[in-house]
Amino acid sequence: PADDDLVELLALAAHHFTPDWARAIRECLVAGAPLDRIVVVRDPSGRLVGWAMHGAYESVAERFGPFGVLEEMRGTGLGKVLLHLVLERMRARGAGSAWFLWTGERSPAGHLYRQAGFTT
């Protein structure tokens, strides 16, 4: 994202997902995390509809997330693209693994993570 995208990203995370994710993004940026840890996506009209990142929590580069796609954009493959783009960036930065804390195993996100090779 560009600097101008960050206010919109924080609002998206806080209002459509959870304020904790907005806080994690904000704290990671204040700590000096590089913007290339974040991938944002906009729809053709320019509206921010999702993002994925890594290293937001305590600057742990191997920790994936937070990650979100607006509900009306789910099922389009957008989440899969975001996940794989960030995993590629993580590998390029030297991460030997990727992990996250939780999701429902039978949820759409759980299926997405399993397809990408994550295990419990």
Image (cartoon, rainbow, N blue to C red):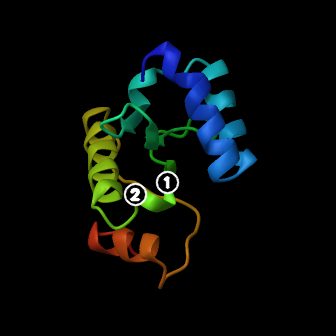
Q: Position of residue 61 (x, y in %)?
A: 47, 39
Which SS class for mark 1?
loop
Indicate the amino acid at tag 2.
Met
The amino acid marked with disc number 1 is Leu
Residue assigned mark 2: 73
In the rendered image of this protein, does residue 27 appear above or below residue 68? above
Q: Secondary structure at mark 2?
A: helix
Q: Position of residue 93 (x, y in %)?
A: 32, 32
Q: Residues within 10 Å of mark 2 (few under 14, many from 20)?
A: few
Q: Position of residue 117 (x, y in %)?
A: 29, 69
Q: From the image, tell me which residue sits under label 1.
A: 70
Mark 1 crowd level (few <14, some 14–19, many ≥20, 10 Å Cα): some
- In this rendering, would 66 be left or right of 91? right
The residue drawn where x is 28% and y is 73% is 115
Quadrant for residue 101, please give it. Answer: bottom right
Depicted 25 relative to depicted 2: above or below: below
Total numbered badges shown on the rendered structure: 2
Q: Are marks 1 and 2 in contact (CB under 8 Å)?
A: yes
- Horizontal side of 28 relative to 19 (left or right) equals left
Name the residue rendered at 55%, 71% in the picture. 103
- Cα–Cα gap, marks 1 and 2: 5 Å
Q: Name the residue rendered at 55%, 78% in the picture.
A: 104
**Relative image position of residue 77 (x, y in whole percent):** 27, 61
Residue situated in front as seen by the camera: 44 or 40: 44
